[in-house]
Amino acid sequence: MTKSELIAELAAANPHLLARDAERIVGTVFEEIITALANGDRVELRGFGAFTVKRRNARTGRNPRTGEAVAVEEKFVPFFKAGKELRERVNRGRPAQRLADGRARG
């Protein structure tokens, strides 16, 4: 689901909201999550999951094209851990089936 699809679903499920209001709500929620993570805070949405920031140490990597050693600086990356309710709803009675190309479908 894309951001625009999420906005459309929210607007459709709440007919009292205008599409631009649904867009503002989704944008505000995402912006608050981004701001909190940029400040090093943890964002927890009960039943959905938690967003945190993880530190990746500096290391020596390899250029895949040439094999040359490349210094990779320390960085911070966003990390999401799904909550119990989300995991249960995703897995409830739906064993993953594999397609010929290796992708899971449900």
Image (cartoon, rainbow, N blue to C red):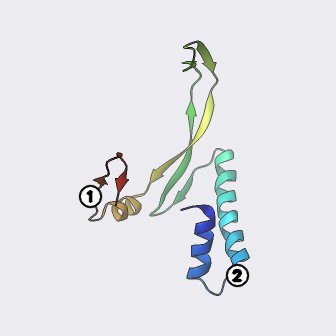
> Where's residue 26, x and y in %?
65, 67
- Which amino acid does the dot numbered 2 rest on? Leu
Q: Which mark is residue 95?
A: 1
Along the viewing direction, whichever of 96 and 66 lies nearer the viewer: 66
* Residue with the mark numbered 2: 18
Pick the quarter of the image with the C terminus.
Answer: bottom left
- Which amino acid does the dot numbered 1 rest on? Pro
Along the viewing direction, whichever of 63 and 47 lies nearer the viewer: 63
Q: Is residue 65 left or right of residue 101?
A: right
Q: Is residue 102 depicted above or below 61 in this figure?
A: below
Q: Quadrant of residue 84?
A: bottom left
Look at 42% across and 57% down and name the residue there: 83
Q: Which mark is residue 10?
A: none
Q: Is residue 39 visible?
A: no
> Where's residue 101, x and y in %?
36, 46
Q: Quadrant of residue 66?
A: top right
Look at 69% across and 64% down and name the residue there: 27
> Where's residue 97, x and y in %?
28, 55
Q: Is residue 34 visible?
A: yes
